[in-house]
Structure formats: structure tokens, C-alpha cells
Amino acid sequence: MVWKSKYRKTNLFIGLFITLLMALLLTLQWGFLEVFEDKLYDWHYKFRGPIKAPEQIVIAAIDEKSLERLGRWPWSRDQLARLIERLDQTEAGLIVLDVIFSEAEKNDRLLGKTIEKNGLTLVPISFDCGQGDRIPLNNQTVIQSAFQKIDHPERLNLYAPFRGKKITLPVPEVLERAMALGHINMFADRDGTLRWEAVAIEYDGYLFPSLDLQAAAIYLGVPADRIILRAAEGVQLGNKRTIPTDHYGRMLIHYYGPERTFPHLSIADLLEGRIPPEAVRGKIVLIGPTAAGIYDLRVTPYSAALPGIEKHANVIASILDQKFLQQASYPLNLGILFFSGVIFSLCIIRMKAVQASIITILAVLAVLLAGYAAFEHWGLWINRVYPSLNIISIFVGITAYNYTAEERYARKMRAMFSSYLTERVVSELIKNPQMAQLGGSRRVVTILFSDIRGFTSFSEKHAPEEVVYLLNEYLEAMTEVVFHWEGTLDKFIGDAIMAFWGAPMEQENQAVLAVRCALHMVDRLAKLQQKWEAEGKPILQVGIGINTGEVLVGNIGAEGKKMDYTIIGDHVNLGSRVESLTKRYRASILITQNTLDRLKEPLAANSLGHLSIRGIVRGVVKGRNLPINLYALSPLEPGQTCHLTECPEDQVVHFDEK
């Protein structure tokens, strides 16, 4: 239907408009939605659960047992020198310290010599990325630990990594004897969760790698000149590994699980020889605090209190395993948003609310599951909050518009048909508007015309007030009868009534309903006549003509000014002429052969009541060439048998009545 087509176009426009609005929010990276997307990303880990960590990494933990046996932290550096000696004896593959020895202590030289002797110990540095003036860097040992090769350095002007203002270094005895240096800075997201590793930090014009990146590269045997920072793209380790990063030199941390996913070896047990050499031989040993009292705990997707040393273990392990995660690019996220929004809009514009609700739930689930599949199988973090919210918003927007439009349409339909039809029929039309195809359609209907005989002379002889009072009382009673028999009240033509059956709703028993309505009108008029006689008022007589045939039914008039739902056609004119013949043949009700043909089955089944149908004449009415059969219809007393008398066939009468 035309109105539905119009609404569908509007619905599609609503879907596209909301999608464009959501694309704008995606471009602006609206804070609340970004935080929600971060939480949805964390859900991936919880849904997946922990996975097996590589065996090459163990943690030498400064835990509660070690604090109990070796004393409160910080320990004297001779204890750490003993630990490195012990790890050297057990042939640890690489030692990574997560402790900055920034303040001088009497055992610094001992620790430095032990580190130098071991030759496989990495030492951390730290940057302060806050406000203030940058302190120039003059230490050549530190400068040598920076990236030696940078591809596309011009991109750094557009996508600047974190920039340090101050630097914290170990004491010189330790700094100058370490195998390599790397920063241990951690930058949590706005919700406090640690999801990213800053692979590079800029300081005084140099870019410094993280301690984790240095540890993985050395363990893999990649020399410093083969560690290439590709600005705004990633880090290449030799020829076989490329670590993807975002534009700002950050890599997503691939977490293997919550705390203690990697083996923890108590430093106290290591120093006391309770750990077998196989536990550390050839492995990367991370030395750092795990005791809660040292306050090096981080919030991660898996845990609210993960020791910082375990973050390092996760980053190193993911580089060794090449389990990299990557955030989808803006064009990809935008494409997913538009694709899902357009497809979803096209799907629901033809659906009812319940169906659209189901499709909405399924579409959101599909987006969420697709996001999880991309994370699990390709290590890709695609944005799902914006597409999901877009789908929900489109559903709400289209549903709200449809509800408003249908309410407006219902009011229009009610205003249009309430004066023609019963409330039940109007409600049915509102539910199923296709039954009333506005604009005109061909339909077989049964038409009833009723007219007061001699009304013109009656009006001339009585006061206007009396004429109007009687006419209104009569028309009100007849309207109730028409509505009672589910007829469509077309119009009042002065004192005449025009009604029909079969439109806008299909009515298989339309002729039966029209005949019963005519009989009821005659009975109701008889009661009115008794009332008028008792009141001393004049008595009105009526004639009713009924015909069945194909007509054009629909809204006819001047659009936007005056429109009427009515019927036009030859059979309408025939019905009017049949009514005008009731006076000639002194019959209250006349029907045509067309109507009688639809009554024969009910008559045979005795479902019409007690009726007399008497053939009156075979005649040709004015304006037609073919003759028609006319039948007088009247009720019989209860108990009398229905009978039908056919029209005489021997002669045809020509009528002049209009």
C-alpha cells in the first residue's frame, strides 16, 4: 500500500540517519562508549578463560615467604647479588630485574660486579611523563639502549608516542654493567585497567624500548640493530617477527590468565637451594615483587590485583609465542558500523514490532559473537559497542516512528470510517489496513437504498422543526440498524439512506446481511410509526431497494480538502432505481436477481428465517439496455414456510423512473 511504502522509505531514512550519527560518535570517540567498549574487550578474556603459558618464563618472586625469611623490603643488595649468582649457577637463560636501584647503597659495587659476571641481566629504567621541563640526557650507556633504526620517523610528528620529562636510572655501578636497559612504565586506561604496553617512549629525541621488548629480542637472539621501530605501525624483530602497534607505539597486551599463570619461585627457596636447577635452566627469570605489601599490583582484564612482574611475563610470552592482538582500524570499524546499520535497517523496515525485536536481539548477538570470533581466531579487536548501540537505536527509532505513524493513521482511519462503520469494523480495519485499499479498487458489494416516500410534500405541510425532529429520529434509528448488521453507511442524501456491504471488509454473506438489515429497518420503522401515532405525529413510509454487483470503492473527492469513502458505478445507480420502484409496486423491499442469486443457498438451508420472495416484474430501468428481475421481499409469520416465486418471463416492462 502507498502509505506503507512511504513509511518504509522513512524507516530506511531513520536507520541511515542514526547510523550517520553513530559514525560521528565513533569518529569523536565519545568517552562513555569507549569505556564501555573497553569493558566489552575485557569480557573476551573472561569468556575465553586462561590458556597455557609458555614454559620459557618463570618468576623469581619477592613474596610473603621471602619477606618473612629475608626481612622487610627493600633488601640489602648483597641479597640480590646472591640471587643472581644462584641463577647463574643454575644456568638461567636470561635474568630480568623489575627493580630500579636508583639510590646508592654500600653493596652497589658487589651487585654490579655480579651482574657483569653473569652477562645476561637486564636492568630497568623509568620515565616520568608528567608536566615540567625535560632534563637533557647525557648518559651514553642509556642512549645506546634506544632504538637504533626507525622507519618513517616523520610519522612521529603526527603520532607522537609517550614523552618522558624526567628519567630515573639505576646507580652507575648497576647501569653500566647491565646487558641491556628497558623502561618499565605502565599506562593504565581511563578506567584504571592495564591493556596496553608502551613499546616505545620518547625522551630527549630518543625512543627507548620497553624492558619486555628488550628481553624477548635478546632471548630470541635478535641483535639491537635488527630491532626496527616502524613508526605508527609496529616493531620488527629480525626477519620473522613483527609486533603490531597502534599509531602511538602501543601494543595490546595478550594476557594468558590471572595471577600465578606463570610459575612462581620464591626467592627464599631459590637462595636456600630448594628449587631444582631444571626449573630455571635456559629460561627467562623475571625478578620482581608479588607480595601485596609492596604495592606493585595492577588491574587487568583478568584480575583486579595482578603483580606488575606478571604483566612483564605476559608481554614477553606473547612476543615469544607470536600471540599478538591488534585493534581494528578506524576505516574497518566504520565499515562494520555502516554495513550492519544498513543491512539491519533494510531487514526490519517491513517487520512488525515483535519480529523486529527478535531480529534486533539476534543482530546484537551476532555482532558480539563476531567480535569474539575475531578476537579468538585473528587477534583482532573490533569495536562492537557502536554497531550494537546503532542496531538498538535504529530499532527504537523505527519502532517509535512506526508507533507514532500508526497512531496517526489509526486516528485518520477512525475519523474517516467512524461515521460509516461500527467500532468493531473500524478497529479491524486499523489492524488490517490492507482491507481498505484507499484510492479506489473494484469490489463486488451489495447496495441498499432507503427513501421516505412523499418526503417533499411532507416537508411543505409541516414546520421545519417538526420535519427535522422526525427525520433525525428516523435516521438515528436506521443508522443503528445498519451498524447492527455490519453495514457501511455511505451517506444521507436528504431523507434517503445509502449503505453497502462487502467493503471495506470482505463479507461473504453480504447479501444476507443486507436483506436482514432491510427487514430490521422495516420492523424498526413499524415501532416508530406506533410511537408517532401515539404522539399524534405524522406517519412516515419508506421503500428499500437492494442490488448486488461490481463497483469502484475508495476515497473520492479533493485530496486534503474533502474526501469521502464511497462507491460508484452502474450497480449503484441500479440500486437507486430499484428503490424508486418500490412505490409503483407497493413493496417495502425490492431486490434484484443479482442479490437473489446470493440468497439461494441460505434459503435452501432455511437460515434466512421466514421470508416471502415474490417475483414482481422483468423490466428495463432507465439508462440500461438489459432487463432485470425484481423481487418483493417481505417477512412471514413464525411457522410459515419460506417460498420463492419467480418473475414472469412473458413480458418486459420499460421504466421511466430515475
Image: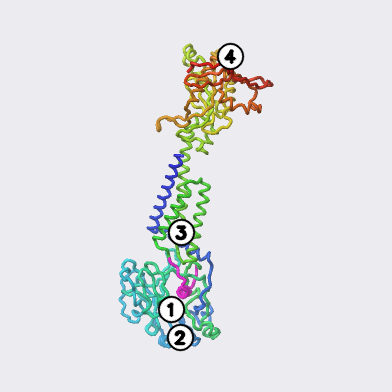
Residue of label 4 = 534
Tell me the distance, in whole angstroms, between the alpha carbons under discs 1 and 4: 115 Å
First reached walking from the N terminus: tag 3 or tag 1: 1
Q: Which amino acid does label 1 sit on?
A: Ala
Residue bounds of the magenta highlight: 304-326
Disc number placed over residue 384 in the picture, else none: 3
SS at badge 1: helix
What type of secondary structure mainly makes up the magenta span? Answer: helix
The foreground one among 595 and 170 is: 595
Mark 1 sits on what residue?
215
- Position of residue 291 relative to residue 328, above or below, is below
Of 187 and 515, nearer the camera is 515
Residue 477 picture quarter: top right
Mark 2, residue position: 81
**Left-right relation of 561 to 503:** left
The reply to whether callout 3 and callout 4 are in contact (CB within 8 Å) is no
Q: Which amino acid does label 4 sit on?
A: Ala
Pick the residue in front: 192 or 37. Answer: 37
Estimate the x, y position of residue 172 in percent, counting from the top left: 37, 83
- Which badge, 3 or 4, is on the more N-terminal residue? 3
Q: Earlier in the sequence, mark 2 or mark 4?
A: 2
Q: Is mark 3 on a helix, strand or loop?
A: loop
Location of residue 226 in the rendering, given as x and y in whole percent from the top left corner: 37, 78
Single out the mark in the foreground, 2 or 4: 4
Residue at image position (40%, 32%) is 559
Disc 4 crowd rating (10 Å Cα; few below 14, some 14-19, many 20+) is few
Q: How far apart are marks 2 and 4 (CA)?
A: 127 Å
Callout 3 amino acid: Arg
Displayed quadrant of residue 507: top right
Q: Which residue is drawn at 53% across and 64% down?
A: 47
